């Protein structure tokens, strides 16, 4: 019998020991800054503070798509926030994201500067600011928002649930892995059925719902997330695979997923981005 099965919760939970697992050292039950650390600021209108996790990659793909569309106002500096070392609890970062999670954006082209946190909010903010990748007709906009919010609500099951228990937890707990594998396969089937009759999540046109969903479910199917391709039999979701590969090959996706990346193939890492050439070198 595993330890977890013998656990009887106390009357009042106390944070008296680290839970174990890959991210144990950064988890705390309280919010707020732990140390003084102003954020660096670059010259471009957009200042991104992030890391190339799936949530971080949403923001960099969006910025790269906007630059590809010719919006020089989307020029950005991307600074690395090392969440394993606790950079998200520095005072400067907490000022722009009280929730201490990447990605966080500061738009210095407005007066005063505009802070935006939560990856979905960053996508909507940039889409509205530049008038791109978010339909304006009410029905089309509602469909885009529906898939975007679907993704924002579903990803914690994939990351915090399945990914955590399958890849990072200190022990393999069958109950937890079963529970989340079931849910993730259901979510993949939701996507697969939708994509059976649509090229992109909302129809013929690529938009921020695709940008939000690709780094999670797309990368899961492509095999860059949790090494769970075989376990989840992701190859059976043929429509998701076709959609993921299509986005994977977009120049902006290739560029965006390298930014703030500090693992994997060293040549493909761009820890910080301050100009297009920083990424060109890594392609
Ligand atoms: N709902 C948030 C989630 C962001 C999030 O979970 N970020 C993770 C990395 S993917 C993080 O910064 N974790 C640091 C921590 O938990 O301390 C969003 O979509 O922006």
Image: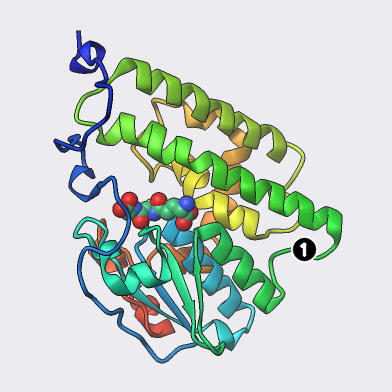
Q: Position of residue 264 (x, y in %)?
A: 26, 56
Of residues 176 and 26, the one nearer the viewer is 26
Q: How many marks?
A: 1
Give the labeled residue for mark 1.
135
Q: Quadrant of residue 226?
A: top left
Q: Residue at x 85, y 58 (%)?
A: 138
Q: Position of residue 151 (x, y in %)?
A: 58, 45
Q: Residue at x 46, y 26 (%)?
A: 233
Asked which colour scheme the image uses, the reply is rainbow
Residue 14 can be seen in this image: yes
Q: Quadrant of residue 187?
A: top right
Residue 271 can be seen in this image: no
Q: Residue at x 24, y 15 (%)?
A: 8
Of residues 50 and 52, the one nearer the viewer is 50
Q: In the figure, 78 relative to 104: above or below?
A: below
Q: In the figure, 147 relative to 185: above or below?
A: below
Q: Residue furthest left?
A: 17
Q: Residue furthest top?
A: 1
Q: In the figure, 217 relative to 61: above or below?
A: above
> Does mark 1's beta carbon lie closer than 8 Å to ligand 1?
no
Mark 1 nearby-residue class (10 Å; few <14, some 14–19, many ≥20): many
- State which quarter of the image contains the N terminus: top left
Instruction: Tell me the element at label 1.
Output: loop
Q: Position of residue 192 (x, y in %)?
A: 64, 34
Q: In the figure, 232 relative to 21: above or below?
A: above
Q: Residue at x 45, y 88 (%)?
A: 44
């Amino acid at each position: 019998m595993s330890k977890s099965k013998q656990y009887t919760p106390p009357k009042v939970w106390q944070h008296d020991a680290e839970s174990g697992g890959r991210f144990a050292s950064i988890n705390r039950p309280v919010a707020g800054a732990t140390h003084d650390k102003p954020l660096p600021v670059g010259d471009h209108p957009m200042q991104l503070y992030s890391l190339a996790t799936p949530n971080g990659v949403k923001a960099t793909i969006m910025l790269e798509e906007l630059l590809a569309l010719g919006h020089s106002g989307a020029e950005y500096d991307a600074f690395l926030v090392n969440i394993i070392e606790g950079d998200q609890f520095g005072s400067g970062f907490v000022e722009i994201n009280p929730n201490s999670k990447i990605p966080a954006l500061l738009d210095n082209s407005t007066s005063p500067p505009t802070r935006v946190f939560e990856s979905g909010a960053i996508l909507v903010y940039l889409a509205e600011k530049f008038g791109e990748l978010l339909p304006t007709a009410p029905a089309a906009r509602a469909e885009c928002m529906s898939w975007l919010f679907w993704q924002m609500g579903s990803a914690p099951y994939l990351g915090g649930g399945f990914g955590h228990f399958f890849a990072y937890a200190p022990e393999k707990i069958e109950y937890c892995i079963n529970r989340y594998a079931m849910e993730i396969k259901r979510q993949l089937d939701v996507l697969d059925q939708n994509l059976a009759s649509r090229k992109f999540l909302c129809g013929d046109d690529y938009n921020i719902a695709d940008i939000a969903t690709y780094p999670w479910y797309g990368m899961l199917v492509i095999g860059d997330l949790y090494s769970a391709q075989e376990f989840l039999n992701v190859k059976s979701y043929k429509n998701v695979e076709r959609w993921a590969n299509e986005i994977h090959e977009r120049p902006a996706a290739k560029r965006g997923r390298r930014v703030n990346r500090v693992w994997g193939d060293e040549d493909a890492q761009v820890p910080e981005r301050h100009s297009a050439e920083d990424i060109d070198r890594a392609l």
